[in-house]
Image (cartoon, rainbow, N blue to C red):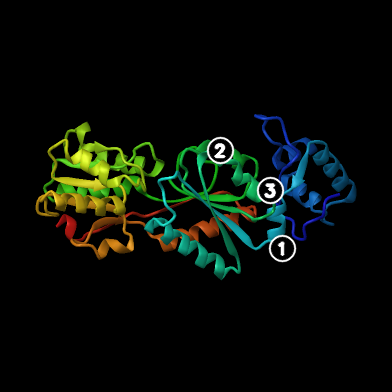
Amino acid sequence: MPRQPAAPTPDDSTPSAQAPARGRKRMQMADIARLAGVSASTVSRALSGSPLIPQATRERITELANSLGYRVNVGAANLRKRGVQTIGVVILGDSMQMISDPFLLSILGSVADTLDERGMSLLLTRLKADRQHVLSDLVESGQVGGLIVIGQLTLHDYLNELTRNGFPMVVWGAPLPDALYPVVGGDNAMGGYLATRHLIEQGCRRIAFFGDITHPEAGQRYQGYTRALQEAGIAMDPRLLQSFLFGDSRIREVIDGWLNQATPFDAIFASSDVTAISLMGSLNERGLSVPADVKLVGYDDIALAEHVHPTLTTIRQPTGEAGRALVDLLFEALAGQPRRSIVLPAELIRRESSA
């Protein structure tokens, strides 16, 4: 028998580390419960050695679990016993997205403060798509009790797979319709709509969009952008769409390349404040004044937004609330509570760049 956790809960178990064949779905606690003809909570208590479960039932369930290669989740069980007091925080991104990005730092600070209030610490790591296995390794090795994942990148399907296999985690990103994992994220579609409608109300008709529409969050902001244009009866011009990755180090090169095309425009909606601030610099170098010649709206409301000149109109994402919500939903998952997601409101912050 493996060492028993002190405080059983429905999420104290995950699929076995006994290597299943590649591509084969891992056995889950719900599968054990179905085969044993009992509830998932009974399986969890039985595998944890709870005296509330009759010995004969415990032995039957334990034998069944062992025969199917099922084991107790070391990370979650140790967290219950306070043996592991660490939560893994994983930032998904490629080589161009920096952890030093002001928006990411703001969320990380809020997560760290909230974990500290709960007597927990965090283990921070950055993960590229080709190292996705690290997510499961962190939990199965017992290094962390659960995961807070920042961003979805191209790993949405893999995150769903981990959730089906019982890994305790919560994701900051876009609330996608088929997401099985709990999500905390902003109302990106509404944010894009508010930003674009505001520019239209300022008299703008040639509004460019800067952002990678294949990215889950930026894609939803683009949906809001197109909705506002359609409501105003403004035809879409594909030349006004500039695909641009968050954190791309070539930001000025991409901006200058687009400006060199001489596409007529009178406003820009940028899907991040960092992009918007870089746009300010490029426009100024070309003798274009913000907001006299070009009106500009960013996204995130990073601290720098109200200190640049002109101050930046933007869509605020409440990072303090986001960090608390991420920790709250993770602990709900660890406690076996029903999965839920939180969509934080988008708020337009009017400043000088769109006046």
Q: Is residue 314 visible?
A: yes
- The residue at 32%/47% (across/down) is 190
Amino acid carrying label 3: it is: Glu
Asked which quadrant contains residue 234, the reply is: top left
Residue at 76%, 45% (x, y): give it: 71
Nearest the eye: 229 or 244? 244
Q: Secondary structure at mark 2?
A: helix
Q: Residue placed at 47% from the left, 60% from the top?
A: 108
Task: Give percent across and percent down for residue 275.
Answer: 29, 50
Badge 3: residue crowd in 10 Å (few <14, some 14–19, many ≥20):
many
Query: Is residue 114 or residue 331 the one in the foreground?
Result: 114
Q: Residues within 10 Å of mark 1 (few under 14, many from 20)?
A: some
The residue closer to the viewer here, 157 or 321, is 157
Q: Is residue 65 left or right of residue 312?
A: right
Q: Is residue 276 above or below residue 180?
A: below
Q: Which mark is residue 158?
A: 2
Badge 1 marks a residue whose secondary structure is loop
Q: Earlier in the sequence, mark 3 or mark 2?
A: 3
Q: Earlier in the sequence, mark 2 or mark 1?
A: 1
Q: Earlier in the sequence, mark 3 or mark 1?
A: 1
Q: CA distance from mark 3 to mark 2?
A: 16 Å
The residue that disc 1 covers is 83
Crowdedness near tag 2: few (<14), some (14–19) or many (≥20) residues, C-alpha within 10 Å? some
- Residue 317: x percent and y percent? 36, 57
Q: Which mark is residue 335?
A: none
Residue 120 x %, y % = 60, 65
Question: Disc 3 and disc 1: Cα gap in Å?
Answer: 15 Å
Q: Amino acid at mark 1?
A: Gly
Q: Is residue 231 visible?
A: no
**Residue linked to disc 3:** 140
Q: Residue at x 65, y 29 (%)?
A: 23
Q: Amino acid at mark 2?
A: Tyr
